[in-house]
Amino acid sequence: MKAMRLSWAAIAAVVVCAPAAAHHSFAAEFDANSPIDLKGTVTKVEWANPHTFFYIDVTDTTGKVENWALELGSPNGLMRRGWTRNSMQVGDVVTVAGWRAKDGGYKGNARSVTLSTGKKLFAGSSNPDGADASPTEAP
């Protein structure tokens, strides 16, 4: 009976931990050969694990507004790079350098974000070949 309980506990642990193992790699979702440079107005910021996301409205050359979802590193990783939850607010105009999603949608992985104050913060990108080495860079 004790062995049966232990077996069920082990199965439950695997089921609960499985989503963490499903975490994607950069290469699975983003194209390292498709760099993006965007400037837009922040519409939403989501501080969550395993990645922080923010959204910006970018106006294209025809005047159409596109809402981009941009992935950053984990909240803890961002704080080590000089970010705070107040670094970027809805309504701020920011400039983002990074890489576009492979599906061609309005989604990207940010390498760095230049805030409206001119301060440049690195995003803790999951790109192993393009991630920043320095924690922060001041203007």
Image: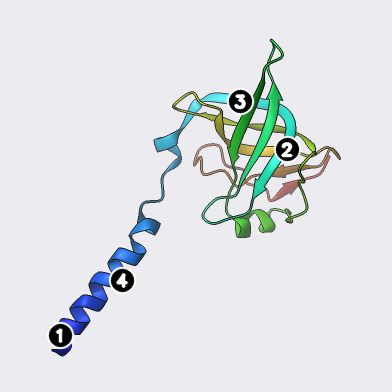
Mark 4 secondary-structure assignment: helix
- The residue labelled by disc 1 is 3
Query: Residue at the spot x=73%, y=54% of the render?
Result: 82
- The residue labelled by disc 3 is 36
Which amino acid is tagged 3? Ile
Numbered label attached to residue 13: 4
- Of tags 3 and 4, the one toward the viewer is 4
Which amino acid is tagged 4? Ala
Between the C-alphas of marks 1 and 4, the distance is 15 Å
> As rendered, which of 122 and 70 lies closer to the eye?
70
Percent x, y of residue 37: 66, 25
- The residue labelled by disc 2 is 42
Percent x, y of residue 27: 42, 36
Query: Which residue reaches farthest bottom?
Result: 2
User: The C terminus is located in which quarter?
Assistant: top right
Query: Residue at the spot x=81%, y=44% of the render?
Result: 138
**Which mark is first along the chain, 4 or 1?**
1
Query: Which residue reaches farthest top?
Result: 62
Mark 2 burial class by Cα count in 10 Å: few <14, some 14-19, many 20+? many
- Of tags 2 and 3, the one toward the viewer is 2
> As rendered, which of 132 and 55 lies closer to the eye?
55
Between the C-alphas of marks 4 and 2, the distance is 39 Å
Instruction: Kindly check if marks 1 and 2 are in contact, taking CB atoms under 8 A apart as contact.
Output: no
